[in-house]
Image (cartoon, grey):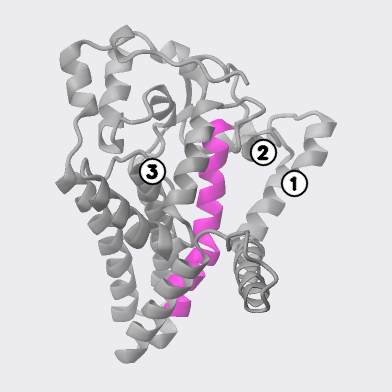
Amino acid sequence: MDAAVRLAPSDIFTPAEWGRLRARSTWRGMALVAHAWGLIALAGWIFLQWPNPLTFILAVMVIGTRQLGLAILMHEAAHLGLSPHQKLNDWVGQWLCAAPVGASLASYRAYHLKHHKFANRPEDPDLGLAEAFPTTRESLWRKAVRDLTGQTFLKQRTAQLGGFFRFQVRRLKGQDNKTSPPAGALPFLAFNLGLLVGLAMVGLWWAYFALWLTPLATWSQWVTRLRNIAEHASLPSPHDPFGQARTTKTSWWEGLMVAPYWVNFHAEHHLFMHTPCYHLGLMHRLLGEKGLHRRMTLAHGYGQVLREATATPSRAQSDQGA
């Protein structure tokens, strides 16, 4: 197996610079998790105070993006970035970040570290997310429609929860004692049932479906796909350490509605994967000061990402991306 090329921090940064970039802070990690949940609560509260189509659409978009934010913070926990104390890092990453959106920190960590080890190579478990691009606008539009109408969510959750219940039935019948249930299914069910019951106790049972499940099934699916496209699709030099991922420069509204918690600095993340997310902006600036942006794949906004993702693909790629 041909692993991805790695650089040493000393190849680029001074000891003082690297000391700043590697520093981890429990309070900053916990503040990010609190920020995600705070924005979810605020968006829901604004809709409850001023219920109308505009505030509902905004709530779905903001909450859906923070649900992606929870997945991003689970990703941060997979790299031990929420706290230098692993038990705290893993508990928060699992129960406040992963479980609400149907993921498992432990399973994701093993999967994701393999992605870093073999980035853009045949052994990369994320390769399938990028190799369908570039594709046609029509194909991308069909993907967007499936995401925004809940079809992608329904397919994923049916497979996950259906597999979980089939496993339980087989186990009760004594037919399966060697395999494990789909990762994340039981914590997802437990958290979401608890949220539904909690909202019902204050007379807001409907808010679970309108202000949690709807964003999770629609906007969160689309921005997750957009994030995946931006990170690894259509890279010109995917085997160069500086080109293993794309960094997308964002406006304030893209940070609010599309790419939370510095997830847009993905080239920097792949260079040194254990750098906390809140230092990636600093890393980007330092790399620019050293004249290294020219070696990186950079996009100016997600509009450019989508243009590059639909740039005259071959017929084979078009068929694969449909």
Q: Where on the picture, by quarter, is residue 198?
A: bottom left
Residue labelled with disc 1: 138
Amino acid of disc 1: Glu
Q: Which residue shows up at 52% across the image and 14% down it? A: 240
Q: Secondary structure at mark 2?
A: helix
Which residue is at 62% across, 65% downward? 177
In three-dimensional space, the C-alpha distance between marks 2 and 1, rounded to whole angstroms, equals 19 Å
Local secondary structure at mark 1? helix
In the image, what residue occupies the spot 53% across and 20% down?
Answer: 4
Crowding around mark 3 (Cα neighbors within 10 Å: few <14, some 14 to 19, many 20+) is many
The quarter holding residue 174 reads bottom right
Residue stretch in magenta: 208-232
| Residue 86: % across, % down | 26, 45
- Residue 279, x across and y down, in percent: 25, 31
**Image position of 322 with respect to 267: above or below:** below
Residue 205 lies in the magenta stretch: no
Q: CA distance from mark 3 to mark 1?
A: 35 Å
Residue at label 3?
78
Q: Of 247 and 183, which appears nearest the observer?
A: 183
